[in-house]
Amino acid sequence: MNQQDRERLTRHDWLRGVGVAAWSIVGIFVVIAVVAWAVYQVRIIWAPLIFAVLLVYLVKPLIDFLERFRLPRVAGGFLVYLVLGGVLVLIGVLIVPIISRQTVELVDQVPEVIDSTFNLVADVAASLNLPIELAGVDSISDELVGWFSDPSNREVILEGLSRAGELARGLLEGVVVVLLAPVLAFYIVVDAHNLRRAAERLIPAADRAEVVHLARQVGKALGGFVRGQLVVAAIVGVLSSTVLWILDLPFWLIVGLLAGLLNVVPFIGPWVGGALGVATALIVGDPIRAVWVVIAFLIIQQFDNHFVSPMVLRVAVHLSPVTIILALLAGGSIGGLLGVLIAVPTTAVFKIIIGHLWRTRVLGESWEQAASAVVVEYEVEPLRERFRRGGAEASRADEEDGGGPAAADGDIADPDRTGSGDNDSLTDS
């Protein structure tokens, strides 16, 4: 075979490789399109499935805990559901009447709220010397107040809302989610062992242990994030409702619950929740109370930002505050509100997977060696140990300065007492 034939074969192989690559790309896009079409066709199942997975993350630790006491998973699932149902019923009995009463009061005060809003705008414009003409606005305000004050129009609104045909599908999907999600979650949790074994059989035996370990770390991070966000939302909601109740703000429970729920949305949610409280105080015509609401929400958010959320996210997803902020900014720029919501758990998952692949594939470590480095367990130092360590450092500083009260009393020079203190520290840790 001469040189020309070799060049012809090389060129032929190159063209064939390009063709295979091109058709492979086309095939990948076709597969993605088919999968996307199939996912869209069965879109009604995704909402209950997502809520079921979230519910699984909440109840699975409880059922696993009961299983340690040799309680079957089915019985444990029924017991957990029974307790959670009782708690929800109790909360409903205590809260629903208050929410219903405040909702009725809010509807009754719509004319007053509209009038107060226009008066507030007029007062602010006058204080700032803004050239705003409110003559037309006043007529609109009078018409709105008169329309809402008419009992017949109010009945028309309520009747129209109750008979709105476009709400039928949304209500149906909501009912499906509410009824189907707990059922799916129950079967997923009860049959978790069989589902896990079935999934493990799909993994090659050589990589099974590594993949299972990685999946457990990802599941632990996601579950911790879901549970942590609910804990943070509950704390903020309770604190907000309590403070607004102390300030005697109308609709304190509704505003407090909304503040807690909106706190799940980073950056945006806390500000919206605080704005609702301030707007309520301003609308009822009490600027002093609005100032107190601002101060209260600032304190609550500082407590949340510096104590509650960092502790929860550090323990749950093992991310530093800088990483969380950058992840939220990137998620918001890429996916908007949805991107902000999933930015932190997505970053946690990528950190686990990329860190594992880097140590095992690039650095050449075994997955057992990399396991301890992929997820770092943050230990919370007990408060007693922190004070004890601070006292020891202060005593050491006095000794270095030439002796202080501790050195004069002979506390540091007593080896028996020092040894007992070390033993106590080891025992406590």
Image (cartoon, rainbow, N blue to C red):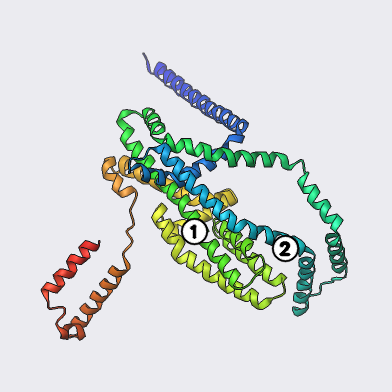
For residue 105, which numbered disc appears in the image?
A: 2
Q: What amino acid is labelled 1 in the image? A: Val
- With 423 as the anchor, is 58 left or right in this view? right
Q: What amino acid is labelled 2 in the image? A: Glu
Find disc 1 in the rendering and name its residue: 232
Residue 331 visible somewhere in the drawing? no
Mark 2 residue crowding within 10 angstroms, few (<14) / some (14–19) / many (20+): few
- With 183 as the anchor, is 212 left or right in this view? left
Q: Give the secondary structure at mark 2.
A: helix
What is the CA distance from the residue labelled 1 to the residue labelled 2? 29 Å
Residue 146 percent coordinates (x, y): 87, 63
Q: Quadrant of residue 149?
A: bottom right
- With 250 as the anchor, is 21 left or right in this view? left
For the point 65% across and 78% down, the residue is: 288
Sequence order check: which comes first, mark 1 or mark 2? 2
For the point 82% across and 56% down, the residue is: 154
Mark 1 residue crowding within 10 angstroms, few (<14) / some (14–19) / many (20+): many
Residue 314 percent coordinates (x, y): 40, 57
119 to 154, vertically: above or below = below
For the point 62% across and 30% down, the residue is: 41
Residue 332 percent coordinates (x, y): 56, 53
